[in-house]
Amino acid sequence: MTEIKKTPDGIEVPPPGPDDVLYDVEENIATITLNRPTILNAMNKNVLRLLDAALTKANDAEDVNVVILRGAGRSFSAGGDLHAALYPDDEPAPGGLEVQLKIWSLQKPVIASVRGHAIGQACELAGVCDLTIASDNARFGEIQIRHGFGPPVLITPFLTSLKRAKEVLLLGEQIGAAEAKELGLVNRVVADADLESETRTIAGKMSSLPQKAIRLNKLLVNRAYEIAGFMDSLNYRDDPIVKALSDEESDDPVAKERQRILKEEGWQAFLKTRDAGYQ
C-alpha cells in the first residue's frame, strides 16, 4: 500500500504515478494531459519525465499532426511542486528547460489549452507552446519572485515588450486572461465552456493543412528568434555574471524564511507570508 504523505498543515500530497501525465490520440491530434488535479497539476520530476516521454511519442507518431497540452480539472498547472521533497527521487529526469525546449523544437505544433492557473513554471510552459488558447477564467503569472527565485525559463521577454516583461517578472502578480492576451502571453480567450471545442477546432485546422508547410513555418519563426538570441537568453545561467547573482538567491534571508515556513508550518502559513503584499 502506498503511503500518503501530508504537509505540515495536513494536506495530502498524492505520490508520483504512471498516470500523472496522460496521452491520447484522436483524428491526428494528440492530447497530453497533466493529471494531478488534486494539487492543480503541480509539476515534479515524475511529471517532467512523463511529459518528456509523451512529447517524444507525439513527435515520432506518424498519425499525429498537432499536439494539445492541457491540465486535468480546474487548472492547467500551479507550476513547480513545492512539496516535491516529500517524495525524494534519485531517478534521472529532464529539467524544465529541457522539456520546454523539446516543445520549442518539436516538429509538430503544440497548442496550450489553459483554464484556471498557469503560474510560475506553468506560465512558461504555456508560453513556449506555439499557440496558447485560454479560458476566460485563466490566470497567468511569473510568481517565482515571491519565493525568492528567478525564472527557470526566460520566455517572457520574447512574448511581451521590454517594459511589460519587467512588470511581469519584477512584481510577480497574477494576470487575468484578457490582460494576458494584451501582453502577448495568449493568442485567444474563449468562454470556459468552449475551451476544449475551440482548441480542437484550431488544432483541426492545422491538422488539415499541408504538414510539411506547417513544420517549415514553425521552424522559420523559431529560427528568426534564435538568430535574435533566444537560445542565449534561455541559457542565461551560463553567463558568469548572471550565474554569480543567481547563486546568491540561496542566501537571500527572505527566501530562506519563506521556505522554512513552508517546510515547518505548512502551505497556508507560507501563502499568508508570501502573498502579504498582494492583498
Image: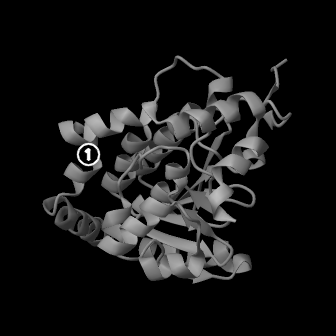
In the displayed structure, 33 sits above or below 243; it is below
60 lies left or right of 33: left
The correct choice, above or below, for 162 with respect to 151 in the image is below
Q: Which residue is label 1 attached to?
A: 236
Image quadrant of residue 7?
Answer: top right
Residue in the image at 33% along x and 65% along y:
157
User: Which amino acid is tagged 1?
Assistant: Tyr
Q: In the drawing, does residue 138 fall left or right of residue 5? A: left
> Horizontal and vertical percent for residue 127?
44, 62
Q: Position of residue 270 (x, y in %)?
A: 70, 42
From the top left corner, tell me how far across and down residue 189 is, in percent: 57, 81
Seen from the viewer's position, the closer of residues 234 and 106 is 234
Can residue 120 be seen from the camera position used here? no
Q: Count residues near mark 1 (Cα–Cα under 10 Å), then give few for <14, some for 14-19, many for 20+.
A: some
Q: Position of residue 39 (x, y in %)?
A: 73, 45
Q: In this view of the protein, can residue 163 be seen by the observer?
A: yes
Query: Which structural element holds mark 1?
Result: helix
Residue at image coords 20%, 50%: 232
Camera-nearest residue between 79 and 197: 79
Q: Quarter of the image holding residue 249?
A: top left
User: Does 159 sit above or below residue 198?
Assistant: above
Which residue extends farthest front?
Answer: 253
